[in-house]
Image: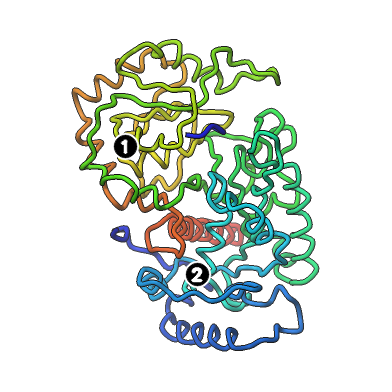
Amino acid sequence: MRDPKLPAPATARRSPPGLAGTLRRHSAWLLLVWFALSVCLFLSAAPPAASPLLRPAVLLRNTKPRALSAATTAATTSNSPVRIYVYDLPSRFNRDWAAADPRCARHLFAAEVALHDALLGCPAARAARPEDADLFFVPVYVSCNFSTANGFPSLSHARGLLADAVALVRREMPYWNRSAGADHVFVASHDFGACFHPMEDVAVADGIPEFLKKSILLQTFGVHGPHVCQEAEHVVIPPHVPPEVALELPEPEKARRDIFAFFRGKMEVHPKNISGRFYSKKVRTELLHHYGRNSKFYLKRKRYDDYRSEMARSLFCLCPLGWAPWSPRLVESVLLGCVPVIIADDIRLPFPSVLRWQDISLQVAEKDVASLETVLDHVVATNLSAIQKNLWDPVKRKALVFNRPLQEGDATWQVLRELEALLDRSQRSRVGSSRR
C-alpha cells in the first residue's frame, strides 16, 4: 500500500431529526444569520475572551480570506446534511505541519488536511457557534511528520499529539465533557486507521487510543467483520488523490486503451521482508510469478513519475493489498477510467450507496490470483462495456475527490451525508433505548 504509483448526486438529501431537522426548517433565516455572523467576525480583530477555541475556524491565524468560487457559492446556498463546528486549535496541531512540508497537503494521507480546508471554506457545512453544531471537528494533522529515512510519514507522535489536542478541548470547552467525545470527529487516514501503525499485528496490539473510542473516526481503513482498528464509530473515506488528476489526461471515454492489465508498484520476489512479515500477504509476489512474462499484463516494479498516464491507457488496473487492504490506486483507477481489479479480501469501500462498487469494479479473491487472466478475459467477452459506462459516470469520479473548496457531490460532501446517516442511526438507537 505504501508504494508510489459534475453534476450533483440524484439522491435526495434527508433532513436529520432533532436539532439538525430544525436547522433545515429554518434554513433561509439561519443562512442570513450565518452570513451576518461571518461578516461580523471577519471585521472583529479581538477574539472572544472566554477561550481561543471559541473563535470560529473560518478565520485562521495569519491567513487572508479567499473569494468564493461559483462552485462554493452553489454549495453554500444548498442545505448541508449536518452542521459541524470546527475547533480553531493552535497551529502546532495542524498548520505548522502543513507549512513545514508541501507533501502534507498532497500525499495519500492528506484527507486530514483536505477535509479541514473544505469545511473551513463552506459556511453551509460549518456551524458558526458551537451551540448550533451537530458535531465537532478536531483538526489534527498526524500524517505530516516526514522525518523517516524512507520518506514516508512517521506516526510515532500521533497518539501524543492527539492526546494533547483532546486535553486542550476538554479543558477549554464544555462540549467534549458533555458527551465524552461522542459527537467529536477525527480523521485517521492511515494504513490501519486510528490504531496508528502501518503493520497490522502492531496496530492490533496497540488498538485505538482509549480517549478516541467514543468519538467518530473518518478513516481509510475498513473491512467486513470485526477488527480492533474499527472498534469505534467510523466512516470509511477514500485515500487522498489530488483533484487535478482527473483533469490531467483525456476524458476516460476518449482515452486510447492499449494496455490490457496494468500494475506498477512494489512486487517482492521474496515477500518476507526484514521484519519477518509477508508483504501483501504474498499476493503481489504471486502476480509477478504468474504474469510477469505474460505480454497481456503490464507489470512494473520500478517507480515512474508519470505512471498515471499508463493507467489511463489500461483496460484493467490491478489494486492488490499492500500492508493494508486499501490503496490510492482505487481512486486513481476510477478517475482515469480504468476498471479497478480489487484483490483484497473483506475490504470495505467508501460511499457504497453512491459508487456502487459492484457496478464499476471487479473483486478477485486473494487465493484466485492464478485465475486472474481467465476472469478478465471473461469480462471482456461479456460485460466490459457496461462496467465502463458505469465507471465513466462523472458523478462517480467526483465522489472520490476532496475538492478545495467543497463542491456538492464530492468526497467531503459524501462524508457529510455519511455523518448525517450516522446521526440518524444514533438518534433512533437512543429513542429505542428510552422505550424499553
Q: Secondary structure at mark 2?
A: loop
Q: Nearer the viewer, mark 1 or mark 2?
A: 1
Q: Which residue is mark 1?
A: 312
Relative depth, front residue between 318 and 213:
318
Q: CA distance from mark 1 to mark 2?
A: 32 Å
* Three-letter residue code for mark 1: Ala
Judge from the rendering whether residue 190 lies leftward or rightward of residue 253; answer left or right. Answer: right
Q: Taking 219 as reference, is 95 left or right?
A: right
- Residue 184 place in picture, x, y as percent: 64, 61
Amino acid on which disc 2 is placed: Gly
| Quadrant in which residue 227 is drawn | top right
Return the x and y of residue 409 as percentages of the image width and height.
Answer: 37, 59
Tag 2 residue: 121
Left or right of 366 in this view: 95: right
- In the depicted view, which residue is nearer to us: 66 or 118? 66
* Direction front: furthest residue: 305
Q: How is the image coloured?
A: rainbow
Between 91 and 397, the one lying in front of the other is 91
| Above or below, comparing residue 278 to residue 69 in the picture | above
